[in-house]
Image: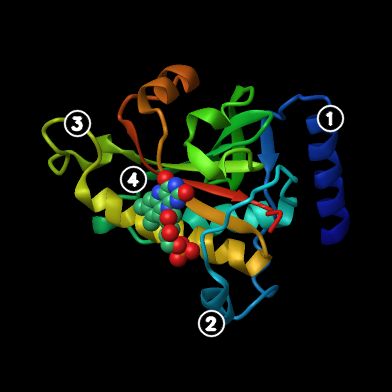
Amino acid sequence: MKRILTLMAVALLSLSACAQKAPKTIQLLEPSYDEGMTLMQALKARKSSSGFTDKEIPLQDLSNILWAAVGVNRPDGKRTSPTGSNRQEIEVYAFFKTGAYYYNFKNHTLELVKEGDFRSLTGRGEAAGAALDLLFFADTDKTKGENPDGGGAATVSYVDVGYVSQNVYLACANAGIGSRARGGWDQQKLVETLGIKPSLVVVLGQTVGYCAE
Ligand SMILES: Cc1cc2nc3c(=O)[nH]c(=O)nc-3n(C[C@H](O)[C@H](O)[C@H](O)COP(=O)(O)O)c2cc1C
């Protein structure tokens, strides 16, 4: 049954990609806890990849990667990655060819923020052109008192995003999918284009995709 649902979801995603139409909500699949490598094997395989292609990422792998980033892993609402004082200030946005999405960790869904290809706003360099770019934003409203005077994210958010990024690296290694942490985003343009609240400050980007290498 789970396999049929997965195939249907992949077919829907592919159809929408063909029509260049971005679905409003993508219901992600329950993480597949029992598939893939051991943790030690994933650590051995972890690396920053290059030579990305735009081959689409299967829904199950996408679901696993986003859950690994900041998903809920306990009944009390706590998450796969820790945050200082449990502020839970890190928000994940996912950029595909068809649109920019917010990862709703409570519902384990991707919510469309804006239709269109905004991947060029997420970073520069050799990781460009992959199927998926993730951006990790810190909500500076949740770190008041810790924020630097001149604006930007609090130091604790850089630490918190480090955990998120490593979780993504490991989930990608587990799935045989490439990944690379990435700088070079355009904060101002992102806020304007996506219409997100200015308290959201990008801390790091991470490209995810299959590689030609
Ligand atoms: C905070 C951070 C920022 C990074 N920014 C970029 C970047 O802008 N462009 C890039 O190609 N790689 C970037 N990387 C990837 C590093 O170059 C890579 O981690 C490093 O070369 C070590 O390789 P490894 O991850 O395979 O061990 C970044 C990595 C980190 C941790």
Q: Foreground: 21 or 44?
A: 44
Q: Is residue 59 left or right of residue 114?
A: right
* Numbered circle sitting on residue 44: none
Disc with the residue nearer the chain's start (3 vs 4): 4
Q: Earlier in the sequence, mark 3 or mark 1?
A: 1
Quarter the C terminus occupies: bottom right
Q: Secondary structure at mark 2?
A: helix
Q: Which mark is residue 40?
A: 2
Where is residue 115? Give x, y as percent.
64, 22
Three-letter amino acid code of the residue under disc 3: Gly
Quarter of the rendering occupied by the N terminus: bottom right
Tell me the CA gap for discs 3 and 4.
Answer: 16 Å
Q: Nearer the viewer, residue 166 or 113?
A: 166
Question: Of tags 3 and 4, which is closer to the observer?
Answer: 3
Cα–Cα span, label 2 and label 1: 38 Å
Residue at (40, 42) in percent of width and height: 183
The amino acid beneath tag 4 is Glu
Q: Report the disc number at residue 89.
A: 4
Q: Give the number of the mark in front: 4 or 1.
A: 1
Q: Does the beta carbon of the residue at mark 3 sit less than 8 Å from ligand 1?
A: no
Give the residue number, with chain letter if any, for mark 3: 151
What label does residue 18 carry, if any? 1
Q: Residues within 10 Å of mark 4 (few under 14, many from 20)?
A: many
